[in-house]
């Protein structure tokens, strides 16, 4: 399997630290608001990686943090804690909004068939680990105290900007206009490991520590949670491209300074989902969430299908038009799968199945090329193989694609069969009594006239029956008659 490694800027063969096992760390959500579908693009692609590693036979341990403290409104450690801002917006406590938005995140993830990570760890549960690592960094001379905060000293490193092949736009720190540079820093790139009094005095969550009462910075959280659950040598670390700098750059700096050796071998970054007007955000434009898509009648898995249609290292433009095109393709695909009807006594052709799987594996082995994996799925439909073999291939691919393909196809087939049965059951079975049969035929002729908007004819039939003492009543399930 080949993965593009952002740290080396090369497509590299994936070789884990321990044969057969993979430690996978994926940065989790900051739970101050709903996740938007851009965030979820990243989680969908990480889920594909997680599932594909398992499909390839690896034993995977995936760890994800929940950022419930310390992520300031700018990634450059300025502004206010996003959690505190969210709590104030909703007049709730930080812990209340953390719980609410964590639950919402996992509910959205479930709708998108994103597997739950093996370990989910909130930052607030790991304060002891943060204190341990920060204390060690101070001891080793990599961190210093200034203005009450503890900073990482980037000048102590041989190399800092590991991901520096990105454009300055990719690496924008997101410093808000008008925010002053932190005067406590010795070097511009230094970052906060532990905040104490600083300027955020109304911070709700604070802990005692050897450095004073305060709270951790955002970056230290991911290093410590990863090391706690995945040890000193991490195989793969993922996140959205905006995490490459400063977040992941700082994670590498502090983890390797603490460990004294290389920490993570492969870095995978998912490019952004943008709107026509630029980067998707939680604060401007329509706030695009899974629930919003559902309220507009979209199936969340159609959004997953939309994401799989392009490579994770290309930015993707979201528009309703683009999504609608994906929905049409997805529905057609389901209908084509529904048409696969295995014959009685048919068996799976193992050689044909292996050939179909090879196309799928080739696509995903090549830096998770999901759009080619979807093409491999269409190739199954076109292949010269029996329906049972094709269904077996689709079931196999869907352990990675996670689009519920066979389930949806079977539901589709059942709906179609129901429609056909309903159409058949509405065929009138006429009475054996010739007199009643004549009335039933007159009623059907009137219904047909009404359907054809020939109301004069419909009225004429009704009047003729009335003249014979037969009164008609129209009900939602059809027309009944009575003799008077
Ligand atoms: P946050 O909740 O802001 O910490 O972000 C959660 C994840 O979503 C991170 O991995 C981000 O890098 C990623 N992310 C943020 N914005 C986008 C976007 N527009 N498209 C794709 N991923 C994004
Ligand atoms: Zn992180």
Image (cartoon, rainbow, N blue to C red):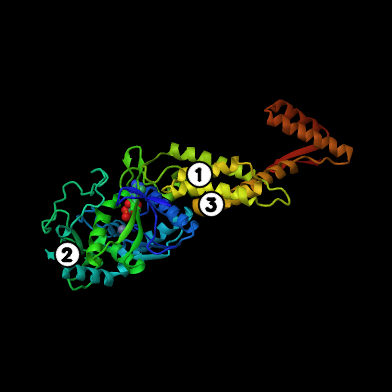
Q: Say few, some or many: other residues with alpha carbon within 10 Å of mark 1 (under 14 / 14 to 19 / 20 or more).
A: some
Q: Name the residue under label 2.
A: 142
386 displayed left or right of 376? right
Q: At 10% across and 56% down in the image, what residue appears?
A: 183
Q: Mark 1 points at which residue?
A: 374
6 displayed left or right of 447? left
Q: At 20% across and 49% down in the image, what residue appears?
A: 175
Question: Helix, strand or loop at disc 2?
Answer: loop
Q: Does residue 212 sit above or below 60 in this rendering?
A: below
Alpha-carbon span between mark 1 and mark 2 = 48 Å
* Residues under numbered marks 3 and 1 in contact, where contact means CB atoms less than 8 Å apart: no
* Residues under numbered marks 2 and 3 in contact, where contact means CB atoms less than 8 Å apart: no
- Residue 87: horizontal and vertical position, in percent? 29, 60
Disc nearer the start of the sequence (1/2): 2
Kindly indicate the quadrant of the structure image that contains residue 253: bottom left
* Residues under numbered marks 1 and 2 in contact, where contact means CB atoms less than 8 Å apart: no
- Residue 443: horizontal and vertical position, in percent? 77, 35
Disc nearer the start of the sequence (2/3): 2
Alpha-carbon span between mark 3 and mark 1 = 10 Å
Alpha-carbon span between mark 2 and mark 3 = 47 Å
Find residue 398 and name its label: 3
- Name the residue nearer the viewer: 435 or 330: 330
- Residue 62: horizontal and vertical position, in percent? 40, 62
Q: Where is ligand 2, by quadrant?
A: bottom left
138 displayed left or right of 63? left
């Amino acid at each position: 399997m080949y993965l593009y490694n952002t740290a080396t800027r090369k497509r590299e063969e994936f070789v884990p630290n321990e044969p057969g096992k993979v430690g996978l760390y994926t940065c989790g959500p900051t739970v101050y608001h709903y996740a938007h579908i851009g965030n979820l693009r990243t989680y969908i692609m990480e889920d594909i990686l997680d599932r594909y590693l398992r499909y390839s036979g690896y034993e995977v341990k995936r760890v994800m943090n929940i950022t419930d403290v310390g992520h300031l409104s700018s990634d450059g450690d300025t502004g206010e804690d996003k959690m505190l801002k969210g709590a104030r917006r909703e007049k709730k406590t930080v812990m209340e909004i953390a719980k609410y938005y964590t639950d919402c995140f996992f509910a959205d993830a479930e709708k998108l068939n994103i597997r739950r990570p093996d370990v989910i760890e909130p930052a607030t549960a790991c304060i002891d680990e943060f204190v341990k690592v920060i204390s060690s960094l101070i001891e080793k001379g990599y961190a210093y105290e200034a203005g009450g905060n503890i900073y990482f000293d980037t000048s102590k490193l041989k190399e800092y900007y590991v991901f520096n092949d990105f454009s300055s736009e990719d690496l924008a720190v997101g410093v808000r206009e008008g925010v002053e540079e932190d005067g406590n820093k010795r070097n511009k790139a230094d970052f906060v490991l532990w905040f104490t009094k600083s300027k955020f005095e109304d911070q709700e969550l604070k802990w005692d520590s050897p450095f004073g009462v305060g709270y951790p910075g955002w970056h230290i959280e991911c290093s410590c949670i990863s090391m706690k659950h995945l040890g000193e040598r991490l195989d793969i670390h993922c996140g959205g491209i905006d995490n490459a700098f400063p977040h992941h750059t700082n994670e590498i700096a502090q983890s390797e300074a603490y460990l004294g050796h290389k920490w993570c071998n492969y870095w995978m970054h998912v490019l952004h989902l943008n709107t026509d007007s630029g980067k998707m955000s939680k604060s401007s434009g329509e706030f695009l969430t899974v629930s919003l898509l559902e309220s507009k009648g979209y199936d969340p898995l159609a959004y997953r299908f939309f994401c799989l249609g392009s490579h994770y290292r290309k930015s993707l433009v979201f528009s309703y038009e683009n999504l609608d095109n994906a929905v049409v393709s997805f529905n057609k695909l389901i209908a084509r799968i529904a048409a696969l009807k295995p014959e009685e006594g048919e068996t799976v052709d193992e050689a044909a199945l292996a050939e179909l799987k090879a196309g799928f594996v080739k696509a995903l082995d090549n830096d998770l090329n999901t759009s080619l994996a979807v093409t491999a799925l269409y190739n199954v439909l076109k292949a010269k193989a029996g329906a049972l073999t094709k269904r077996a291939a689709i079931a196999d691919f869907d352990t990675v694609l996670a689009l519920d393909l066979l389930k949806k196809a079977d539901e589709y087939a059942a709906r179609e069969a129901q429609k056909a049965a309903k159409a058949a059951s509405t065929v009138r079975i006429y009475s054996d009594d010739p007199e009643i049969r004549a009335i039933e035929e007159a009623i059907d002729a009137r219904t047909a006239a009404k359907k054809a908007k020939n109301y004069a004819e419909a009225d004429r039939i009704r009047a003729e029956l009335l003249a014979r003492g037969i009164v008609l009543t129209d009900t939602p399930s059809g027309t009944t008659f009575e003799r008077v």
